[in-house]
Every structure is written in structure tokens, then in C-alpha cells.
Image (spheres, helix red, strand yellow):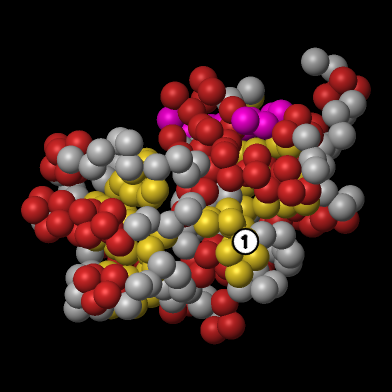
Amino acid sequence: MTHHERQSINYQVVAFDLDGTLLNSQGQILPSSKQAIQQLLAKNIKVVLVTGRHHTAARPYHYQLGLDTPIICCNGTYIYDVAHNSTPVANPLTREQAQLVIKIAEKYQTHLLMYSRDAMNFKQLNEHMEKFSRWVQDCPPQVRPNLQQIECFEQLLEKNEIIWKFVISHPDRQVMESAVAELPISQFSCEWSWVDRVDIANHGNSKGGRLLELLAMWQISPQNVIAFGDNHNDISMLKSIGLGVAMGNAEAEVKTQAKITALSNDQDAIANVLAQYI
């Protein structure tokens, strides 16, 4: 493909996964990526964050980049409209589904993180949570993520709280696989978001599906979209749009599903690809 052909597509949207993609291994946006995104915004190209994170944990980056677009959260469980603090599209877990996940997590003694409407809730700290809560404290107060330590998950369910998803984690992968195997595939979407973490959301939720819905609202063809990702939960998104870009640090399976593979998230991967294609 010549440079001229590459630029013949009029890309209107660029979608980014956060962890392992837009964020480097220190959890920061590289200056080169930030500059490239500012150039996109100057050209009226929409920039969308598509993440496994809760909206309160994606908001600091949305704020840092000066975006005004909705955020696709929890692997496509809902679209969060930042300006109105609303969720125009949402497919949370039912109370019965949530009860089943809690029961299985207790049976296998896995660590559990429950994402409710406006907070991430946990009972006990683990290594992930300690690192995460340090980051939370460092965020500017107006966009600080909402992380709550609670005594009982069921109490939140009794309040009819909206439950977006759960994250279960355990150092022993076998334990995790056994726990996940007890969740009926017809009811749940289970995505490995890290070596020792599985995201559990409602069946049918995916980053790709929800991004297509957002594009339809904007009346933008998926062909005119570039998306960057590094993990299994990004495959649906990379396959459903015009130019799927796997990061150099992505797993092999993710790379095979993408159109191109870039440098790693610690290098100027994003700036390089955007300079080539836009």
C-alpha cells in the first residue's frame, strides 16, 4: 500500500483501548500519543476510549486528553456520556446473575471486585487493588475514581444497585479456569483481561458490538475507523472496523486478528501509525 493509498480513506474516528495500549507500562499516556491525539482533534476526528474499566477509572484520561466523546466502558457493557453523567446504552447484570458470581467467587475464594453504577467495590485489598488505590489517590480530585471498600456485596444488591461487571482474580490460573467454567456461557461474557484476571459481564456485551452501535448513532461507517488494542477483549473491536491495529506487546492471537501490528505501548507506536494513515 502506497502512502497515497493509505491516506485515501477518510478516517473519522480513532478508538483506543487504555491498559496496555494508550497507556504505557507505567500507566501513562506517552507525550507522542498525546500530541498525535491533539492533532486528530484539531482535524475534527473523534477520539473514543473503549475500555474494560469503569467510567470513573477512565475519566482521568478522558479529562487529560480534553475529550468530549462518550466512553465505552466495562468491555462494552455500557456507553457513558461524560457531559451528562448518563448511560444512554447499558446492559448490566441482573441481580440473579450477580448473586451467582458472588457465590462462585466465595466457593473458589477468588478476589472479587464489583463494578456498581458509580463505584468499584471490594472487600479485601490484594496486590492489584493496592497499586490501583495508590493511582486513585494521585488523580486530580475532580476526576478521582470511586473505589469503595465494603463489608458485604449482597447489601449493594439489596439496594437494587446497577451492577456493570465483576473482576475475579486469583494467582492460580487453574482455580480461575474452574471458577469461570461454572458460569453458563449463555448468560455471561467472560474475558481474560490480564494473566490472572477475568472480567465477567452480561452475555453479548463486547467492545466491538458497542463501538458499532456508537458509530451507527453518529452515522459513521466502520470502514472509516482506526482502533488500537492489545488484549483478547479488544479482538471484537479490531475485527469490526476498517483498520484494526494490534500493539507490539499484544498477544499473538490479537495480532493475527488485526490488520497491522505496531510498536509496543512503551514506544511511539500510536503516533507512528497515525502519522502514516491520517
User: Can residue 24 be seen?
Assistant: no
Residue numbers of the magenta segment: 240-251
Residue at 8 percent across and 53 percent down: it is 107
Q: Where is residue 225 in the image (x, y as percent from the top left)?
A: 74, 37
Above-or-below relation of 80 to 107: below
Q: Does the magenta stretch include residue 259?
A: no
Residue at 23 percent across and 54 percent down: it is 101
Q: Position of residue 79 (x, y in %)?
A: 59, 57
> Quick one: 62 or 270, which is closer to the camera?
62
Q: Is residue 93 left or right of residue 6?
A: left
Q: Circle 1 — which element? A: strand
Which of the image's four quarters has the C terminus?
Answer: top right
Q: Which residue lies furthest to the top in this view?
A: 1
Residue at 75 percent across and 30 percent down: it is 223
User: Can residue 250 be seen?
Assistant: yes
Q: Residue furthest bottom?
A: 141
> Quick one: 163 or 113, which is closer to the camera?
163
Badge 1 crowding class, 10 Å Cα cut-off, few under 14, some 14 to 19, many 20 or more, is: few
Q: Is residue 164 left or right of residue 228?
A: left
Which of the image's four quarters has the N terminus?
Answer: top right
Q: Does the magenta stretch include residue 243?
A: yes
Q: What residue type is labelled 1?
A: Pro
Q: How many marks?
A: 1
Q: Where is residue 125 in the image (x, y as percent from the top left)?
A: 23, 69
> Label 1, on which residue?
88
Residue 67: image quadrant is bottom right
Residue at 57 percent across and 39 percent down: it is 209
Q: Where is residue 168 in the image (x, y as percent from the top left)?
A: 26, 53
Residue 226: image quadrant is top right
Q: In this view, does 7 lie to the left or right of 109?
A: right
Q: Which residue lies furthest to the left in this view?
A: 107
